[in-house]
Amino acid sequence: MGCSGSKGVEASASKGVAINKPKQRIIWLAGCSSAGKTFTGDYLATRGYTHIDGDMGNQIDTPEMKEMWGNLHGAMQAFMAK
């Protein structure tokens, strides 16, 4: 009885079908210097979010990451220009 429901879940999962997949959320924090953006991002990271600090692009030395942050910055500039 209860097993028939779980069999269906297992069969669907074995076929690669996502079941009860949680929704993804993006939270964009913006504010003045010392407003608590990094603190809030660090806190959210303890709650299961991935924290990507915008200052990171200024502090990274690897060429791949510099390019990625440059592309992100360019995309945001283009978005803000609209």
Image: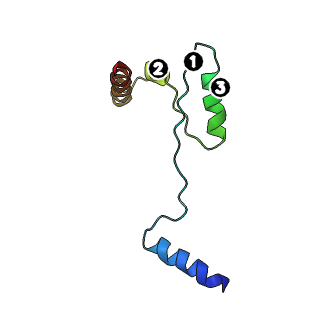
Q: Nearer the viewer, mark 3 or mark 2?
A: 3
Residue extending furthest toward the front: 82
In the rendered view, does 39 fall on the left or right side of 13? Answer: right
Q: Nearer the viewer, mark 1 or mark 2?
A: 1
Task: Give percent across and percent down for residue 77.
Answer: 36, 20
Which amino acid, by three-letter code, is at mark 2?
Answer: Gln
User: In which quadrant of the rendered view does residue 17 lie?
Assistant: bottom left
Label 1: which secondary element: loop
- The quarter in which the N terminus is drawn is bottom right
Decide: marks 3, 2 in contact (CB < 8 A)? Answer: no
The residue at 38%/24% (across/down) is 76
Q: On screen, 15 above or below 47? A: below
Q: Alpha carbon of mark 1 to alpha carbon of mark 3: how far?
A: 12 Å
Q: Alpha carbon of mark 1 to alpha carbon of mark 2: how far?
A: 19 Å
Which amino acid, by three-letter code, is at mark 1?
Answer: Gly
The residue at 33%/27% (across/down) is 71
Label 3: which secondary element: helix
In the rendered view, does 11 fall on the left or right side of 35? Answer: left
Task: Give percent across and percent down for residue 65.
Answer: 38, 29
Residue 31 is labelled as 1
Q: Which residue is mark 2?
A: 59
Label 3 packing within 10 angstroms: few (<14), some (14-19), many (20+): few
Label 2 packing within 10 angstroms: few (<14), some (14-19), many (20+): few
Residue extending furthest toward the top: 33
* Colour convention of the picture: rainbow
Q: Which residue is mark 3?
A: 39
